Image (tube, rainbow, N blue to C red):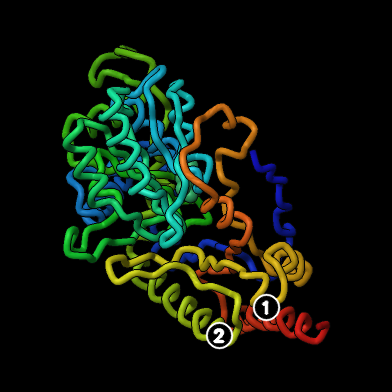
């Protein structure tokens, strides 16, 4: 087993932040309305409106607002009936919250490697493993979780069709992928999260849009939406006093958070436009920096440009990822290494891992650059200059 040491996080007082909230006048007005109406908790008009508008964006029949993306994934797991010893397949190269909710339910996780093109889980590898399981008569997984990391849609067409055919539950972790679409022939302009049995989104402070903290479960199933909503509100039977039919959760979003989220949804076109400009500027300046490999882009996918994440080819650039991380951190530029593959984390080492070293490579060479919608041209120029500096330094040193 390859040992991976923890990589230090960025300094707390970065002068160029990684991913800050970008708020407009509408958020302010809506939140003030919550204060004026004394509707700051779960009672109030905004949760329902946020759900309706979000369902429309995604093109799903239902959206159930909840306290976080992790809560949305947990509600999906429980509502879809996953439990003790159910096998769940998941990517290794993702944020840990993709798998944790399934561990809460004592599922058995099997982790899969990434595909080098999109960095998302290698769905061909999953399909190959499924055929092998069928041939050998070994059992199939109960569920597959796919994540759309860094806001880039995963290749899902064949895997989704196979899951449907074999009766395997498909859950999309779209926590990083609000406003990301498939635009290929198979899914003509379809929002990610709308293909699986459930799609889960996060409105954490560092995501594309934020409600301060919050999440959303989307689904086309009336039953699933009803159950998820019921479980998120302590499994309380409406109309009866303190009558609960099972052990529920307190996962409901507050009215004040929903107000913020609703304002952000209305600002989404502006946030997205700003992100596109930031990405174009990075892409243009990186063309002159050999060895800094831009993030994946494909004609079939419309990524949301959440975090501009590059791979550092140490030989061509002249310095490795960790040298770059340290250099940028010293300049108070907030950067992050890419995810630590989950199969290398001590608490997940008992999970079988299928694949090779693609995720390990991505983890060793990947770097997310400051990508806030509010990033100024000057701030971005500082980031690019710092990158150039190191390339130049290294060249001089040779
Ligand atoms: C952020 C994130 C989550 C969890 O969302 P929270 O709202 O922070 O709980 C889950 N999965 C992925 C891939 C994420 O990036």
| Callout 2 secondary element | helix
195 sits to left or right of 100:
left
Q: Would you say residue 37 is visible in this rendering?
A: no
Q: Quadrant of residue 316?
A: bottom right
For the point 45% across and 73% down, the residue is 275
Residue receiving disc 1: 387
**Residue at the farthest right position:** 397
Quadrant showing the N terminus? top right
10 sits left or right of 277 in the view:
right
Q: Nearer the viewer, residue 306 or 375?
A: 306
166 above or below 333? Answer: above
Q: Residue at x 55, y 40 (%)?
A: 342
User: Height in image: 67 above or below 231?
Assistant: below
| Percent coordinates x, y for residue 21 in the rendering | 52, 61
The residue shown at (22%, 58%) is 190
Check disc 2 and report the residue beneath it.
285
| Residue sitting at the far front | 136
């Amino acid at each position: 087993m390859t040992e991976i040491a923890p990589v230090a996080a960025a300094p707390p007082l970065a002068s160029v932040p990684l991913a800050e909230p970008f708020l407009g006048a509408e958020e302010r007005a809506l939140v003030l309305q919550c204060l004026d109406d004394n509707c700051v908790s779960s009672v109030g008009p905004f949760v329902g409106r946020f759900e309706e508008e979000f369902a429309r964006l995604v093109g799903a029949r239902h959206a159930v607002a909840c306290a976080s993306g992790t809560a949305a994934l947990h509600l999906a797991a429980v509502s879809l009936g996953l439990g003790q010893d159910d096998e769940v397949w998941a990517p290794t190269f993702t944020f840990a919250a993709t798998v944790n909710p399934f561990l809460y339910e004592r599922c058995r996780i099997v982790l899969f490697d990434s595909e080098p093109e999109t960095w998302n889980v290698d769905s061909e590898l999953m399909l190959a493993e499924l055929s092998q399981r069928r041939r050998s008569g070994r059992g199939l997984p109960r569920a597959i979780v796919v994540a759309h990391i860094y806001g880039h849609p995963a290749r899902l067409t064949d895997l989704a069709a196979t899951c449907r055919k074999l009766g395997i539950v498909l859950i999309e972790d779209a926590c990083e992928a609000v406003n990301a679409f498939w635009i290929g022939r198979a899914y003509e302009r379809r929002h990610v999260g709308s293909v699986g049995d459930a799609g889960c989104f996060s409105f954490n402070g560092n995501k594309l849009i934020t409600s301060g903290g919050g999440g959303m479960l989307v689904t086309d199933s009336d039953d699933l939406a009803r159950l998820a909503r019921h479980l998120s509100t302590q499994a309380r039977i409406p109309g009866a006093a303190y009558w609960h039919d099972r052990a529920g959760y307190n996962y409901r979003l507050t009215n004040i958070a929903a107000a913020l989220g609703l304002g952000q949804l209305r600002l989404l076109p502006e946030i997205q436009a700003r992100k596109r400009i930031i990405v174009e500027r990075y892409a243009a300046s990186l063309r002159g920096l050999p060895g800094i490999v831009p993030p994946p882009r494909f004609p079939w996918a419309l990524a949301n440009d959440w975090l501009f994440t590059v791979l550092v080819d140490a030989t061509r650039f002249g310095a490795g990822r960790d040298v770059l991380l340290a250099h940028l951190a010293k300049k108070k530029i907030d950067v992050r290494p890419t995810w630590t593959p989950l199969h290398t984390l001590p608490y997940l080492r008992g999970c079988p891992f299928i694949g090779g070293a693609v995720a390990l490579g991505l983890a060793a060479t990947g770097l997310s650059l400051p990508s806030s919608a509010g990033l100024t041209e000057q701030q971005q120029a500082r980031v690019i200059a710092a990158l150039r500096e190191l390339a130049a330094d290294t060249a001089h040193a040779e």
